Image (cartoon, rainbow, N blue to C red):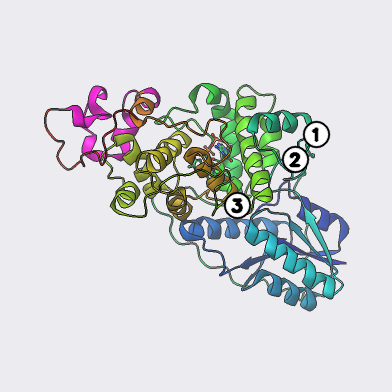
Amino acid sequence: DTVIVLLTRDLRVNDHPALAEACALARSVVPLFVLDPGIRARGRQGFLHEALHDLRSSLRRLGGDLVVRSGDPVEETIRLAALVRADGVFTSADVSAYARRRERRLAEACAARRLLLRLFPGVTVVPPGALRPAGGDHYRVFTPYWRAWTRIGHRPVLPAPDAIRLPPEAEPGELPAPPRPPHGSLRGGETAARWRLEHWLALGLAGYAAGHDDLAGQKTSMLSPYLRFGCVSPSEVAARSLGRCGGEEFVRQLCWRDFYYQVALAFPDLPRRDYRERKVDWNGDGDAAQAWREGMTGVPVVDAGMRQLAAEGWMHNRARMITASYLTRRLRVHWRIGGEHFADLLLDADIPDNWGNWQWVAGTGNDTRPNRVLNPVRQAKRFDPEGEYVRRYVPELAGLPAASVHEPWKLPGRVPGYAAPLVALDNV
Ligand code: FAD
């Protein structure tokens, strides 16, 4: 009669399989979010709190509420289950080692109290583990995964529930006030996500194939933080994009997200250990790593990317590849050091995408050409030909013309206030 829906990183009412099923089966439903001190939200705290406020408003409009607790999610769920006399707990399945440990503990605690626990899809388009290659437990190479992914049927997109009835015993609890977001950062929550999705489908998607590598143009969806917190469902994004102009190229990127989720499920050590072992004499976390973090390497496109990250909590994918390649291949700083910094600052940082991509760039991951090294100057000239991206984020170089903005060291004198390159870039 009463079901608790334990929400984690699925902060929405639309296309939410666990919530939809609970509303279809139970007379009363308790949407629960537990603020877990074991998770360092780092730069994402403000975005998370905005998303929770937005979700609470949506649930109230449906007649329900968001019940908020803080502490250990398993203990809080079980305590609430006793209070509201719940029959079951529904939650979305996730892949990180932390999330899976939580799921296992929840399963044990529910079994001990004869509570039904059901896990639902919703974090990815295709559930991790649903596709397996012949003779293996997961796909290690993207292209065959993409082929299988496009062939398998995707689950239908579900509407938001019509109404939610909260049991009277469920005291909603206080939500922390969201801190004022820093200038330029994205606003959290399903309302903002849906607005961005509509805007993207109407105005952005058609230009994606041609423009997504353009560093200065903001021609990508910027949906990643919303996907990270589940403010929008990846299945809905995929279903609504396919069949439109630009849709296939875009959905292919969403498939990369699913790809890394199934890698992370099969290899839980992804944030810590080489996925594919590679002998490298790594440098430690010294002055070079610090200059990289501060956007003071003297390589304009690298510095622009790192400063965009610090200012906005987001970085263009091409800039992520250039900055990560520079750190791991030129400075030979271990990928874990770079990944930690990204995890601190990115609004969209999550375990499979962040660490899967870092290992890809470092040559220890799923790249079929692990020796690939990006030349930052060549990349900059190609993807920021006018130097607009660099000038936007590196004000010291704002007065330089396109011809020298990517290689200021070639000018006769030093640019005042701008660092000399940490390492020479020839023979990259
Ligand atoms: P779009 O180009 O609009 O793509 C749509 C969606 O597809 C994205 O929102 C994302 O969910 C998915 N996607 C796109 N590219 C990739 C990719 N290479 N791998 C996996 N999924 C992808 N993405 C994260 O979501 N979280 C991270 O922590 C993260 N860390 C990264 C670290 C490095 C070193 C690199 C090179 C890439 C990383 N990415 C990460 C992937 C990618 O850079 C971002 O997903 C993308 O820039 C987000 O912008 P967007 O939403 O405008 O992307």
Q: Which residue is mark 3?
A: 229
- Magenta span dominant secondary structure: helix
Q: Residue at x 27, y 24 (%)?
A: 402
Residue at the farthest left position: 413
Q: Position of residue 279 (x, y in %)?
A: 48, 44
How many numbered discs sit on the rendered protein? Answer: 3
Residue type at mark 1: give it.
Gly
User: Disc 1 on helix, strand or loop?
Assistant: loop
Residue type at mark 3: give it.
Phe
User: Of callouts 2 and 3, which one flags the residue occurring earlier in the amino acid sequence?
Assistant: 2
Above or below, 29 relative to 47: below
Seen from the viewer's position, the closer of residues 332 and 251 is: 332
Q: Nearer the viewer, mark 3 or mark 1?
A: 1
- Range shown magenta: 382-411
Label 3: how many Cα within 10 Å (few below 14, some 14–19, many 20+): many
Q: Position of residue 358 (x, y in %)?
A: 50, 44
Mark 3 and mark 1: Cα distance apart in space: 24 Å
Residue type at mark 2: give it.
Gly
Please tell me whether residue 398 belongs to the stretch shown in magenta: yes
Q: Looking at the figure, which quarter contains the C terminus?
A: top left
Seen from the viewer's position, the closer of residues 131 and 280 is: 280
Q: Which residue is mark 2?
A: 136
Cβ of mark 1 under 8 Å from ligand 1: the answer is no
Cβ of mark 2 under 8 Å from ligand 1: the answer is no
Q: Residue at x 38, y 23 (%)?
A: 382
Q: Which residue is mark 1?
A: 153
Q: Position of residue 248 (x, y in %)?
A: 64, 25
Which quarter of the picture shows residue 31? bottom right
